[in-house]
Image (spheres, helix red, strand yellow):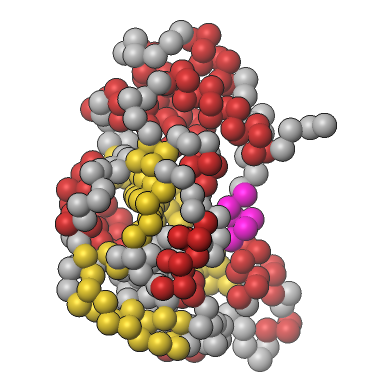
Amino acid sequence: MPETPNETDAKRWTQLHKMLAPERPTAIIDIGANPVEPSPYDLLLTQGLAQVYCFEPQPSAYEALLAENRPNRIVLPYAVGDGTESTLHICRHSGFTSLLPPNPAAIAYLEKWAGMMTVTEQVQVQTVRLDDIAEIPHADLIKIDIQGGEAAVFRNGPDKLHDALMVFTEVAAIPLYVGQPLMHEQMRLLSDAGFYLHKFDTLKAVNVARRFSPFLQAKYHQNQLVDGDAIFIRSLLDLQSLTVEQLKHLAILSDAVIQSYDLALAVLDLLITKDCIGSEADVMEYCAMLPANRPRRLRQAQASEGAKTLL
């Protein structure tokens, strides 16, 4: 019987981890960990190769995370932000809940999601600055998806951001929320912190539906970009400046989380040059386990299916 992709991936990650022999598990911070879709690091966590710190202030989503009772994962009910008291706008569809109110102008323009973005409850919360959270010593990966609040987290977490190797963040093309910073603002903040954009994991676009839309087949004319997930890498143009331990975790994240096998191989090449890992034969054995063709974009397919259910 052919191996499933998950079994194949698990074998490859085990080989990679054995070859790299990092001093500790890969540390991941997940801000806005609402389990409405699979996490990109999920199988890495399942293999016991990561320590994950999840933050989710929405009561129903927080309880759902606790109920999963995953090993090597700490779940905390904090609203990460600028450290001030704020209002959590709980929407009918929990995936739209935000510290920012939904933007009526965007909803009217798109003619979508009005029902799901309807605020059903407003809860006062005390936000916490990322740098003030004592429970997390540092992070190799910061994953964040908090519906418009990402820039506030970056501004108030320079120390944690300085330690990170990768940022996996939701970026917006148009403001679905009032006062939402858009992609260019996140790019500026992350660039100032030493990160460059490496790739987009997903990009969501929809068709602008109006009365003449029946003249077009909607699935072929989804031209309005809404948002997506972007991946930023620290010191992308100067990987040599990273420590050996940082390089090891960057290789793990490049393969297991974002499927950037070319970046993973570039890091392994650098580690071989530094004489910090095994032989070239070990790397060749790992290479033999890589997908022969373009990897199936599992999360992108899931995001696409999820978008269809929302339209």
- Of the pair 153 and 132, the residue shown nearer to us: 132
**Would residue 88 be found to the left or right of residue 120 on screen?**
left
- Of the pair 58 and 255, the residue shown nearer to us: 58
Residue 69 on image: x %, y %: 49, 53
**How many marks on residues?**
0
The single residue placed furthest to the right in the displayed view is 1
Is residue 89 shown to the viewer in this render?
Answer: yes
**Would residue 289 be found to the left or right of residue 109 on screen?**
right
Q: Which residue is drawn at 22% across and 48% down?
A: 160
Q: Which residue is drawn at 61% across and 48% down?
A: 297
Is residue 110 shown to the viewer in this render?
Answer: no
Where on the picture, by quarter, is residue 305?
bottom right
Question: Compared with residue 81, is residue 86 higher up or lower down, i.e. above or below?
Answer: below
> Which of the image's four quarters has the N terminus?
top right
Magenta stretch: dominant SS? helix
Q: Residue at x 45, y 88 (%)?
A: 120
Question: Compared with residue 219, is residue 55 higher up or lower down, i.e. above or below?
Answer: above
Residue 245 on image: x %, y %: 30, 26
Residue 250 on image: x %, y %: 38, 33
Q: What is the span of residues highlighted in magenta in the rendered image?
A: 298-303
Q: Is residue 299 magenta?
A: yes
Q: Which residue is drawn at 37% across and 51% down?
A: 74
Residue 197 on image: x %, y %: 37, 47
Question: Compared with residue 116, is residue 4 higher up or lower down, i.e. above or below?
Answer: above
Q: Is residue 180 magenta?
A: no
- Of the pair 35 and 207, the residue shown nearer to us: 35
> Which of the image's four quarters has the C terminus?
bottom right
Where on the picture, by quarter, is residue 277?
top left
Question: Compared with residue 25, is residue 138 higher up or lower down, i.e. above or below?
Answer: below
